[in-house]
Amino acid sequence: MNYKRKQPCKDCPYRKDSENQKWCKEEFENLLDKDADFIGSVFGCHKKDNHVCVGWLMDQVNRNFPSISLRFSLISNSVNRNYLNGLYCKSAMYSNINEMVKANYPELLRENMPVNKDQFSLRSSDLKQNL
């Protein structure tokens, strides 16, 4: 992965001034799935030229690098903090992945999907039974 660009391209879906729904729904689904995955991923630019997607990278920086795959990639490519601090965008960007997805395919947002909240709750009695 190449870390040379310092700003998102003009068609980056993280930019608010880029055309909505230019990218297929499956790409946004993949982005949400990989973002929810513990290991994560590294997303390349849609131009498929082996450059990292700078819009995605800026989102990762703002969220303290939740993608473990990105952390490994930054280390293996000797990317330093000076490069990351130099990332910028001349236009307004979506503040997070969900805001970007909502602008393109709102039906994909996990918050719109029914969730059984009981499956995520953990009671202290559950812990005692497992000890």
Image (tube, rainbow, N blue to C red):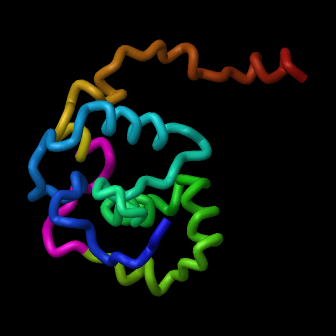
Residue 106 is covered by the magenta coloring: no
| Figure quadrant of residue 98 | top left
Pick whichever, 80 or 120, lies toward us: 80
Q: Is residue 94 above or below residue 36?
A: below
Pick whichever, 12 or 128, lies toward us: 12
- Residue 85 spot, x, y in % from top left: 41, 81
Q: Is residue 95 above or below residue 77?
A: above
In-image side of 126 versus 18 (left or right): right
| Figure quadrant of residue 49 | bottom left
Q: Is residue 25 above or below residue 57?
A: above
Pick whichever, 29 or 51, lies toward us: 51
Q: Residue furthest bottom?
A: 82
User: Residue at image x 48%, y 40%?
Assistant: 34
- Residue 90 spot, x, y in % from top left: 16, 75
Q: Which residues are magenta?
A: 89-99
Residue 96 is covered by the magenta coloring: yes
User: Residue at image x 9%, y 49%?
Assistant: 19
| Figure quadrant of residue 101 | top left
In-image side of 103 versus 38 (left or right): left
Question: Which quadrant: the C terminus?
Answer: top right
- Residue 27 spot, x, y in % from top left: 32, 38
User: Residue at image x 68%, y 21%?
Assistant: 123
Q: Residue furthest right?
A: 131
Q: Is most of the magenta stretch helix, strand or loop?
A: loop
User: Residue at image x 57%, y 22%?
Assistant: 120
Pick whichever, 50 or 70, lies toward us: 50
Count the marks: how many? 0
Q: Is residue 29 above or below residue 83?
A: above
- Residue 28 spot, x, y in % from top left: 31, 38
